[in-house]
Amino acid sequence: MHQQQAHRLPAEDRRRQLLDTALNLFSHKGFEGTTTKEIAAAAGVTEALIFRHFPSKQALYTAVLDCEHESGEHETVFARWKSLMDSNDDIGLFRALLEKVIASYRNDSRIHRILFFAALEGHQAGLELHRERSLPIFELLCQYVARRQKEGAIRAGIPPQAIVGALAGTAAHFGMMTQFFGFPHDSPDAGVVDAFLDIFLRGVLPSPSLEKATV
Amino acid sequence: MHQQQAHRLPAEDRRRQLLDTALNLFSHKGFEGTTTKEIAAAAGVTEALIFRHFPSKQALYTAVLDCEHESGEHETVFARWKSLMDSNDDIGLFRALLEKVIASYRNDSRIHRILFFAALEGHQAGLELHRERSLPIFELLCQYVARRQKEGAIRAGIPPQAIVGALAGTAAHFGMMTQFFGFPHDSPDAGVVDAFLDIFLRGVLPSPSLEKATV
DNA sequence: TTGACTCGTAAGTAAGCACTCACTTACACT
DNA sequence: AGTGTAAGTGAGTGCTTACTTACGAGTCAA
């Protein structure tokens, strides 16, 4: 947690270190709950150095949000999903979406936390960023679902937004409850994904035709 | 927002007013982001009065959380659900659950906000309270689903926790995204509930391809 | 060696924080 | 009318906050 005697780093390195340290603290205690003194101590420098690299605490906060946006990880996941769409692999796509959402809560929970703080504290820049990032993906998925509905591969009559929203929401809520709210969960994530996918694809009502097929 | 000249209330009334005012502010700005001065100003009294009714800011905060617990509204909803369970009205129960969750985000969003803040800021008492309140309902629903699975009214082979979690999660996530994150939504809540229920009950795959899906 | 440039700090500042205390005021009950 | 008491306040307390300023120290080219 604490780095000491990290003297005389090049400006760019120090900047990144401060951003990372700030992300750690902001994501666990919010903007108001985190002090610049704390951030400095956690980075092993004096408070004054923070204000050499960032004009204000607020600027540091928005820089933390912007910084996360730049990480290219989203693009690779995005690309994989597109290839699943191109091959009309509905089930593969839905499973990948469920897995990715839950995994992101397990691995990058700092980012989810800080976005939640932004939403609750009314930090407009953070909210706007979240929407800018999420909406295109959401809409792309909706377009895919709409196309597959036309092709008869997905049941028509359900709004695509509801389908994508239900899928993402199920996974996101599960991630939140277990990761942030400390709700107990016994089964491993993979089993949960299977169960959600099963419900989502075939519903919860029993189907006579299904029983015939499996017997 | 501001009450003025509300002088000389009986202690119990003033206490309740302060709790309500504090809930307003805490739910929008968090514990750290709200000052006792603000709460006092919004209630139209001096800061000192707050500390006559509550020993500390922290005590006021936990009192706000406890206070919400006491409102008997949960019991009536709870009772209605139980009667739906007694009459084995699966669809009615699931619809009521979806409606209640979404409506609670629309109407009592202050409580959801403050619980989220508690989760993020690590306020253990708030988290514990949330779990104590939610888990029994969750488990009761799980027991119901398990029974209906035995009776053949709900597909077996899916963990009841996944079924209840998926249903609640879908609704909760929708409520959160539209209410807290400012995501746009065109259709009315009733239509969304119908769509979610449709997906949940019968899945997204069309009937003919059900056999394929099992392979 | 010099000097210029950058990285970093010690020691501030004014404002804001939760919280206190000595005190007044309004009202119920004689 | 007088008095005991609960309700409410103005003016502070010491401490922390974000942010500043004046200065030192390492590095490297000339």
Image (cartoon, coloured by chain):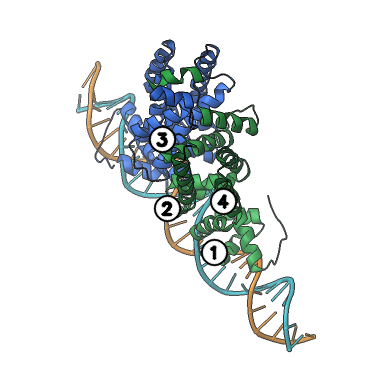
Chain colours: A blue, B green, C cyan, D orange
C28 or D17: nearer the eye? C28
Q: CA distance from mark 3 to mark 4?
A: 25 Å
Residue B203: image location, x then y, percent = 50, 26
Question: Which image quarter is the C terminus of chain B in?
Answer: top left
The image's mark for residue B54 is: 1
Q: Are marks 3 and 1 on the same chain?
A: yes
Which residue is pictured at 41% across the width and 22% down the height? Answer: A213
Q: Mark 1 — on which chain does it sit?
A: B
Q: Secondary structure at mark 3?
A: loop
Residue A171 lies left or right of residue B70; in this view the side is left
Q: CA distance from mark 3 to mark 1?
A: 49 Å
Q: Which residue is mark 4?
A: B78
Q: Secondary structure at mark 2?
A: helix
Which is nearer the N-term, disc 3 or disc 2? 2
Q: CA distance from mark 4 to mark 2?
A: 25 Å
User: What is the count of numbered marks?
Assistant: 4
Dot 2 amino acid type: Gln
Residue D4: image location, x then y, percent = 65, 84
Which is nearer the N-term, disc 1 or disc 4? 1
